[in-house]
Amino acid sequence: MTLDAADARTYLNGLLDGHARAPAVATPSSPKLAWLKALRAEAVERVGVLTVPSLRDEAWRFTDLSPMTQRSFRPLETPSRLTTGDVERFYIGEAATRLVFVDGVHAPHLSSTDATSVVAGDLAAMITSHRAAIEAHLARHAGFRDNLFVALNTAFLHDAAAIVVPRQMNVAAPVHLLFIATQPDVASHPRVLVVAEPDSSVVLIEEYAALQAGAYFTNAVVEVAVDAGACVEHVRVQRESDEAFHIGHCTVSLAQAGRYHSVNVALGARLSRLGLDVLQTADATHCSLDGLALIGGRQLADTHTRIDHAKPHGSSRQLHKCIVDGAAHAVFNGKVMVRPGAQRTDSSQSSRNLLLTPKALVDTQPQLEIYADDVKCTHGATVGQLDAEQVFYLQSRGLAEAAARNLLTYAFGAEVIDRIPVASLRQSLERTVIERTAGQP
Amino acid sequence: MIRPDSTTLLEVRDLFATVSGVEILKGVDLTVKRGEVHAIMGPNGSGKSTLAKVLAGHAAYQVTGGEVRFEGRDLLALPPEARARAGVFLAFQYPVEIPGVGNSQFLRLAYNTVQAERGRDELDPLEFDDLVRDRMQLLDMNAEFLDRSVNEGFSGGEKKRNEILQMALLEPKLAILDETDSGLDIDALRVVSKGVNRLAGDDNAIVLVTHYQRLLNYIVPDYVHVMSDGRIVKTGGKELAVELEARGYDWIGGETEAARTVS
């Protein structure tokens, strides 16, 4: 099932191959960028030390990576040339700023920025104009020293989406980050840095889509720094191809009274994993993490979240739902940590799972670790089928049994979708859920 | 209203049913004609609600004997949705909450499904909105109920009004109201009764399942049946309900017991 050490080394070297050939940011010789070069070098070194996680690792005990490690992926060689016509179906009407990356490479001709508000661009541009913010945050939140996939991503760190929301600016229109996979067998390493300066707010849509049906590997890392009094709403939509492998990490750091709301929707990929870590570094912060995995066939979707209440008066809300069809497998692990001194923490977590077939499987593990005594923390998990009384109620009003089941399945997912703050995205995802659930017997 | 020329809508003959292997219905006979209002009364556990659920087609209840004809068709052979489309409506004793399904969306879906069966045109959301708001006025319902999930967070009285709203939209031939009066205060009871009376006509019939005579002050029955131990043991006019209210159910059991002993 798992790789032996030598195989693993070869595999990782294969993945690393070409990282040195990747185009460097700005001028590599610039002494001002020495820190970035040093980071990358250290990340390469860590990839040399770390190993591919196996089922023996606690954090991966339900997610078998062997379907991924049995394949080889290569760095992108020839970038795809896409036109607006190829990708505009993914555009979101409300978004004024859009950054498009094709197989991990920024495509400026498909992107558009609204210069009047948020500052967004690729790393090469931003590292010159916003050096202080970038240097203070890039690779400072998503730890790569103990995480192979973050280390791999950091080793390849040459292109990234960087967003800096200036102090007190409330960005009305969402920022859309669109990562499109077009070539099979390619490994890409999308990278995002979001810095919301004090008392600013922004809505971010991070979306992974495919213009291919093949197997490829997306290894994404997102860092979100929420400064004092700032608010970031973050929607993450993963609709990779059904054969894809998707590993994503998102690390969020909240300063005094900072707020972070996220809705994560996992629809695609043969195997996907999202690691979402939120660290409350100061008093009175709030986060809500909502998620929906809607999978079928032989898909596996794994969501690991960690909310670290390190300071007092913090609050967190979490609703994670999985709809599992066919012989698919959903994994949820949600850790809520309340550190000593994080008094008056108010946290609730709920994991709700719907299994549509006898072969569907879910492993859910809510985990509370509380080291403070004056806190309010609740959590719960349910796994079940559709409620027979609800099905009968709908039938008794004339709906056929299949239609009743579809409607209820849709409604189960809609509770999460409805929390997305962008109307057109909400509607398109609702349609997706309806199309997916309409296949039920 | 009892009319001599009225035709039979529902014919229940010697109906037996079990739930989880326990026999609840033990030979129910009931004939309902168009235009009539029937009340089925009886103590808890006598099988009233089971009869209502069996007629609506709930899968947890197994029919083990007898037959049910609706407009001459074998009702028991139909799945629940086909019964609804044929014109049978059950107002639930405990209406189910369905988080995530908008009430307005649900009502329109149900309405259009039943309309299609009757060969009538479906309504688009705007046209339906006019219709449903009109019906809601009848029941003193606030339009904000449309924007909420089906029954979610509704009070007991709001849920019952929502049931009668569905009845008003679907215009069933046979409406079975299962303890619709339970949990209603007097104002709500009056509003719900008004709604039901407005829907009662020459062509449809109403079966009220109730524990108390109170409802029958507002919806006057043509027949009152008393159920006991899975059978209808006594049938009378509206005055029977008054007598039941005054004397309770025990004397009925004694009377039938006595009758059995004699025979």
Image (tube, coloured by chain):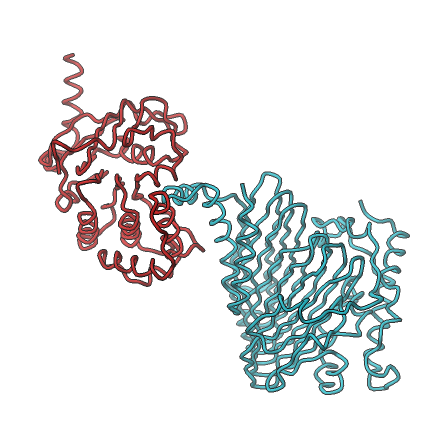
The spot of residue B177 in percent (x, y) is: 26, 42
- Figure label count: 0
Tell me the residue at 62%/72% (across/down).
A176
Q: Is residue A314 visible?
A: yes
B211 left or right of A179 in image: left
The answer to whether residue B163 is above or below residue A88 is: above
The spot of residue B227 in percent (x, y) is: 22, 29
The spot of residue B57 in percent (x, y) is: 37, 34
B54 left or right of A122 in image: left
Tell me the residue at 74%/74% (across/down).
A106
Chain letter, colour cyan: A
Residue A356 picture quarter? top right
Nearer to the camera, A238 or A376:
A238
Nearer to the camera, A162 or A176:
A176
Quadrant housing the C terminus of chain B: top left
The answer to whether residue A55 is above or below residue B205 is: below
Residue B242 picture quarter? top left
Nearer to the camera, B202 or A427:
B202
The spot of residue B148 in percent (x, y) is: 38, 59
Quadrant housing the N terminus of chain B: top left
Q: Name the colour assigned to chain B in the rendering.
A: red
Q: Is residue B210 visible?
A: no
